[in-house]
Image (cartoon, grey):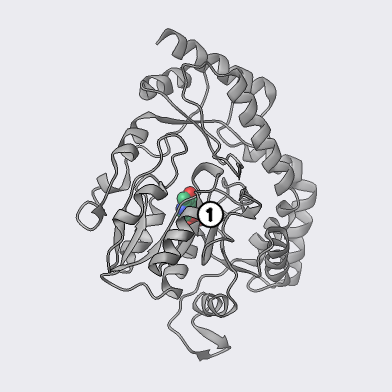
Amino acid sequence: MKIEMVDLKREYRNLKAELLPAVEEVMESAAFIKGPAVDRFSRNVETLLDVPHHIPCANGTDALKLSLMALGIKPGDEVITTPFTFVATAEVIAFFGAVPVFTDIQPDTLLMDPARLEEAITPRTKAIIPVHLFGQMADMDAVMAIAVKHGLKVVEDTAQAFYASRNGKYAGTVGDIGTISYFPSKNLGAYGDAGGLLCSDDDLAQKITMIANHGQKKKYEHHLIGVNSRLDTMQAAILDVKLKYIKEWSEKRLAAAKKYMERLSPAVQLPVIDQGNVHVFHQFTIQHDRRDDLKDFLETKGVPSAVHYPIPLHRQPGFTSLCRIVSASLSEKAADRVLSLPISPWITDEEIDYVCEQVNTFVNNA
Ligand SMILES: *Cc1c(COP(=O)(O)O)cnc(C)c1O
């Protein structure tokens, strides 16, 4: 059996009949930048996620960067996040000369632990970036309560959690800004780089829109220093086709995760769905003490797996000298134990069975 980590080829075969005409329409119109599909897609995201503003941009890292620009993050400011995330979350903080301050995760959900957040706050703290890791939301009620109490801004890194929700609110719509990545393997993926921001505040949304387009309100009138970070019309057209399926795909991911949880041996530490969360399982990530051996064993059986993430960011050579660590021991432990198994809306029952059989063979004999 040949299993893919994320089966994008299967996805394309299923959607080809809808995607090709959408792309052809863009080609025929030659409106490659700011074509009608860009606005159409944004309005459809706003309706789906019940949020006033979706601002498209070039990728998920830019979405984070644009957020910190719009919030006026300056050299010497501190921004709190967890070290157990993809590098982009903290990279953008350092990019502005601000200090990434690392606070630890919860050992079961692997999400920012709000109980450890307050001890990270200093007079220099400006913002918090909770990461909705692997497809479920961090405890936003607790994070927002602390942010409001201390006058801090909150940027939700929603790259892995498009359409996830918590207590009836969608990921990215609770904090000041939510940032999305439409990287091809994300739950809603373009066929190239793409990103977006969610925002409820009209003035902040306008500022972000201007910054993403050279600081201009009108053509050749530059009110702010901005950048060029746009969503291509072609990618918007592809995303708009795929957006119609996000509910169905999210349900399929959840169903696949539940099958994994039923079939995997109790010797494996399973992912935990936090109370109030609708999880969209961007990754299905288990934990085991002999993670590296398990990964090697699976590879010999034709089962791909991935380590998200092997080195917590405070241990990365590029970060050690410029970050501040408040707490990180649980992130370190997780980095040694996590293993993501194949999951996508296209994974079959037989594939899940085969993966479970192999994992169970290893862990039951370990
Ligand atoms: C993918 C990802 C990003 C960056 O998105 P790109 O579109 O690749 O720039 C940021 N944060 C997290 C948590 C991610 O998983």
State the residue lying farthest toward the top.
365
* Residue at left offset 63%, top offset 18%: 353
Q: Residue at x 39, y 76 (%)?
A: 72
Q: Residue furthest left?
A: 321
Q: Position of residue 12 (x, y in %)?
A: 69, 43
24, above or below 111, in the image: below
Picture coordinates of residue 337, whole percent (x, y) = 38, 29
Tag count: 1
Q: In the visual, does 237 lie left or right of 202?
A: right
| 273 shown above or below 18 | above
Place residue 26 in its image quadrant: bottom right
> Does any atom of ligand 1 lie closer than 8 Å to the CB of label 1?
no
Q: Determine if residue 345 is in view.
A: no
Relative height, residue 180 to residue 69 (above, below): above
Residue linked to disc 1: 158
80, 56: nearer the viewer: 80
Looking at this view, is 61 or 69 the one in front? 69
Where the C terminus falls, by quadrant? Answer: top left
* Quadrant holding the N terminus: top right
Could you tell me which secondary element the residue under label 1 belongs to?
A: loop
Tell me if 269 is positioned left or right of 171 in this view: left
Amino acid under disc 1: Thr
Residue name at image x 31 percent, y 62 percent: 94
- Residue 247 in the image, given as x and y percentages of width and height: 72, 47
Percent from the top left, x then y, of residue 141?
A: 52, 55
Whether residue 194 can be seen here = yes
Outermost residue, bottom side: 221
Instruction: Give the residue drawn at x 36%, y 22%.
Output: 289
Q: Residues within 10 Å of mark 1 (few under 14, many from 20)?
A: many
Is the residue 150 above or below the residue 20 in the image? below
